[in-house]
Image (spheres, grey):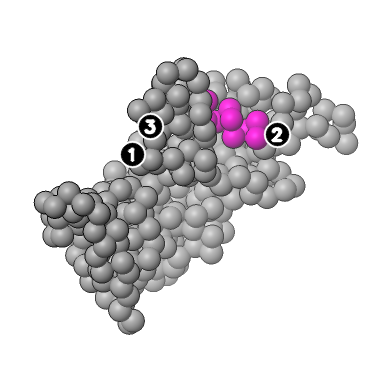
Amino acid sequence: MSLFSAFATDVAIDLGTANTCIFARGRGIVLNEPSIVAFNIAKGSIEAVGAEAHEMLGRTPANIKPVRPMKDGVIADFDAAEKMLMYFVRKVQGNSPLRRPRIVIGVPPEITQVERRAVKDSGYRVKASEVHLVDEPMAAAIGSGLPVTEAAGNMIIDIGGGTTDIAVISLAGTVYGRSLRVAGNALDEAIISYMRRAHNLLIGERTAEQIKFELGSAAALDQPLTMEVKGRHLVEGVPRTLKISDGDIREALSEPVRLIVQAVRDALERVPPELSADIFDRGVVLTGGGALLRNLDKRLRDETGLPVLVAENPLTSVVLGAGRMLTDLALLRKVALD
């Protein structure tokens, strides 16, 4: 091993709307934190990044502004995205000038050329020796163990924070790809809207996320679930606690879930016949944080008549797939966007 390689640790990054994951070669997943930067407007400096910034949501004074650099699967704030990426990579790598890692970054399918260049530039600013970009659905398929290089259709549905990416992959290429801007964040917003409309209760982003995890489902559950929710009553203007059920939240999520199901049906109608037969035999793989929504696999099975499987590690499929490319350079050359 050379002195250079001893100090460099190649990394793979999933730059997600909700969370950023980093995989280091030889070490596995070394970071998984919310994609948030808290800026101190008065000082013009960064107050916190990642988990620390997420804790501040809904609790910041006027001079602290939490920013999500990614919105709807694309970069909404270049400056914040770059600062976040640099912070995370340095947290994993340290500041040694001898560290010149190779970086593989998973990016949304609908990213523009300008955004691609911005992401690559950010990678080079953290002193990377090489920066390679790969489509997130392709990385998710590889991370889920799908045989993407074979001459057969593999369908993956990656439900992230900002987008639901639906792709059919064959021979290391995307035969069909679609990005729907309805995903985890849209589910949270639907819960906030429902609580306001049905119960006159104003809740925050973090509370909505907690409700989604504890009660969210796409089809009826065998065992009913309930939880207490705290918020501010819109009419009375004071804090209130309310008991809600999984049925309430299923109603709240009905429209975004319907849109995701419809997008999957549309995709199946547009796939070439030979690949449709492969998908019928192999089934559909669900990945991303949205794959954890209870009974979503059952709902998709009922609606499409196809086998639907949830990936073994749905939250980390993209970064695991990108990480595999760090050691399989032949595969990286086949699937890299550059």
Query: Residue 268 magenta-drawn?
Result: no
| Amino acid at the residue labelled 2 | Gln
Q: Earlier in the sequence, mark 3 or mark 2?
A: 3
Highlighted magenta segment, given as a residue range: 83-91
Against 246, residue 82 (above or below) is above
Amino acid type shown at disc 3: Pro
| Residue at the spot of label 2 | 93
Mark drawn on residue 61: 3
Along the line of sight, the residue nearer the viewer: 62 or 119: 62
Tell us which disc is closer to us: 1 or 3. Answer: 3
Residue 44 is situated, as x and y percent measured from the top left of the image, at 46, 17
Picture quarter containing residue 253? bottom left
| Residue 313 visible in the displayed image | yes
Q: Earlier in the sequence, mark 1 or mark 3?
A: 3
Residue at horizontal 32%, vertical 54%? Answer: 208
Mark pair 2, 1: CA separation:
29 Å
Residue visible at 55% across and 36% down in the picture: 105
